[in-house]
Amino acid sequence: MQFKFLSNLILMVFLNLLVKPVAIFGIDAAVQNRVGVEEYGFYFALLNFTYIFNIILDFGITNYNTKYVAQYPNLVKRYMGKTFPLRLFLFVVYVVFSGLLAWTFGYDGRQWYFLAILIFNQFLISITFYFRSYFAGLLMFKIDILLSVLDKLLLILIAGWLLYGPAKNGLFQLEWFVWSQTASFGITACIAFVLIIWKVGIPRLHWSPVFNWVMLRKSFPYALLVLLMMLYQRVDAVMIERLNPGGVGRHEAGIYAQAFRILDAFVMFGMLFSNLLYPMFSRLIKQNESVRELLDSASRLLIGFSIVGAAFCFFYAPVILDVVYTPEIQEAVPTFQWLLLSLVPISIISLFGTLLTANGSLRVLNYLSFAGLLVNVGLNLFFIPWWGAFGASLATLLTQSGIAVLQLIYVWKFFRLQLQISVLLRYAGLIAWLAATFYIARLTGDALKSVLLFMGSSFVGAFIFGMIQGRVLLAMLRRKA
C-alpha cells in the first residue's frame, strides 16, 4: 500500500507541477493583473460565496462514496444508479438556497449575473468530483489524477488564447474568464462521465426516496464537516467585502486574493494527497491493518514540504509578488507572509483529518470545525475593520494552528501513537536549516541567486532531516524494476 501511494504520488506531483502552476500564475493571476485588483476582488468575493455552501451540491456523498466503493467495489454500478438522481436534486436545492442568500445580502444586477455562472460552474466541478470518487474508490488513481488536471489544462488553452491571443493588447473582460471556466469544467465533466460509463457500464437510474433518506442521513456527518470547514476557510473573502462595503472592500478582497491564490496552489497538493490517502486509509482500517507506516511516509512528505513552502514564501514574499503581480506589491506583502504560514497547519489538518474521516471519527472533526468557525468569524469581526486583508490573514493563521494542534492530540491518543522527540527535532532542524540558508543566501546580494541557493539547500535539507526517505525510494525503484 505504501508503494502504491508513493508511486501514484510521484505521477500526481509531476502532472500537477506541469499544469497547475501555469493555470494559477499564467492565467488566474494574469487575469487579476489585466482587470485590476478591485475588479478581481469583486469576482473573488462572489466565488467564495459559491464555495461556502457548495456542500449542498454534494452533501458528503463524494467522501462517503469513495469509502464505500473502496470497501465494496462489486456494488459500484447499482450504487451509482441511485446516487446520481440524488445529485441532480441537490443541485436544485443549492440554486434555490444560494439565490435566497444572495437576495438577503442585497446583491445588485451585475453580481447576480456572475453569481448565476459561478453557481453552474460549482455544479460542473462537483459532478466531476463525484465521478472521480469512483475511480479513487476503485484505486484507479491514474485516471483520477489525469482528470484532476484536465480542467486546468483546458482553462490554460481557452483563457490563455483570450489573454495572449489576437486580443492580448485589448481590454480583457472578467466575463471571458468566467465563461472559459465554464467551458473547461463542462468538457472535463463530460469526459469523466464517458470514462466511468466505460468502466462500470450504464447504470439504471432509479429515484428511491427510502435510499435517498438513508444516504443523506449517513452522509450528513460528512456534509456537516465539509460545510463547517468551508465556512471557516472561505468566509474571510466574503467578510472582507461585506465589512468594508464599496470600493474599499473589493480592493481589500483583491489584496487577499493575491495571497490566497498562492496558498490555494499549495493546498491543492495537500488535497491531492488526501484523495490518494483516503481510500488507502479506509481499506487498511477495514482490514484491521496498521496505518502507522503509511501515515509516517505521508506526514514526512506533506508536512516537511509545507514547511519548506511556507518558509520560502515568508522569506521571499516581495520577490514572489513582484514576479506574479503588477499592482499593490508592497501593500500585499504582510498579508501574503502571514497567510502563507497557514500552509503548515492546513497540511497537518489535511493529513490527519483524512485519517480521522476514513476512521469514521466525524463527530470529533465536526466539533473541531465548529470551534474553528466560531474562532475564525470572531477574529475576523475584530481584525478586518482594523487591518482589512492583513487582519483576515492573521485570523486564518491562528484558527488553522489551533485546529491542527487539537487534531494532532486526538490522533495521538486515539491511534495510540507515541510522540517521539526525534520527530519534533527533525522538523525543528529543518526550520533552523531553512532560516540559516535564507540569511546566508541573501548575502549574495542577487535575488535570483538567493532563490536558487535557497531552493537547492531546501532539497538537501529534506534529505538530511528525513522528509525524503532514500531507502523507500530505492525500494520503489527495485520493485518497479
Image (cartoon, rainbow, N blue to C red):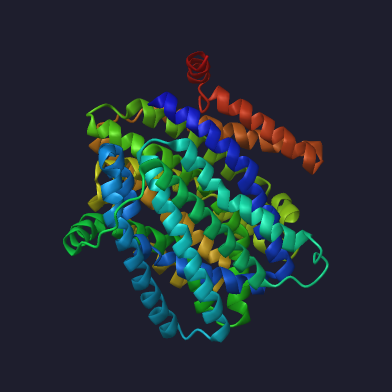
Residue in the image at 44% along x and 64% along y: 123
- Looking at this rendering, what residue extends furthest in the left direction? 210
Identify the residue shown where x is 50% and y is 78%: 242
Residue 194 vs residue 368, the one in the foreground: 194
Image position, residue 417 (x, y; %): 29, 30
Return the x and y of residue 307 as percentages of the image width and height. 54, 40
Q: Position of residue 74 (x, y in %)?
A: 26, 38
Could you tell me which residue is drawn at 30 percent across and 46 percent down? 77
Question: In the figure, 215 relative to 16: above or below?
Answer: below
The answer to whether residue 32 is above or below residue 282 is below
**Residue visible at 56% across and 64% down in the picture:** 182
Q: Is residue 368 visible?
A: no
Relative horizontal placement of residue 329, taking residue 95 as reference (left or right): right
Q: Which of the 4 quarters of the picture holds residue 250? A: bottom right
Occupied quadrant, residue 40: bottom right
Query: Taking 294 as reference, is 242 above or below it?
Result: below
Question: 388 and 94: which one is in front?
Answer: 94
User: Does residue 253 appear to the left or right of 216 in the view shown?
Assistant: right
Q: Quadrant of residue 408?
A: top left
Q: Is residue 282 left or right of residue 335?
A: left
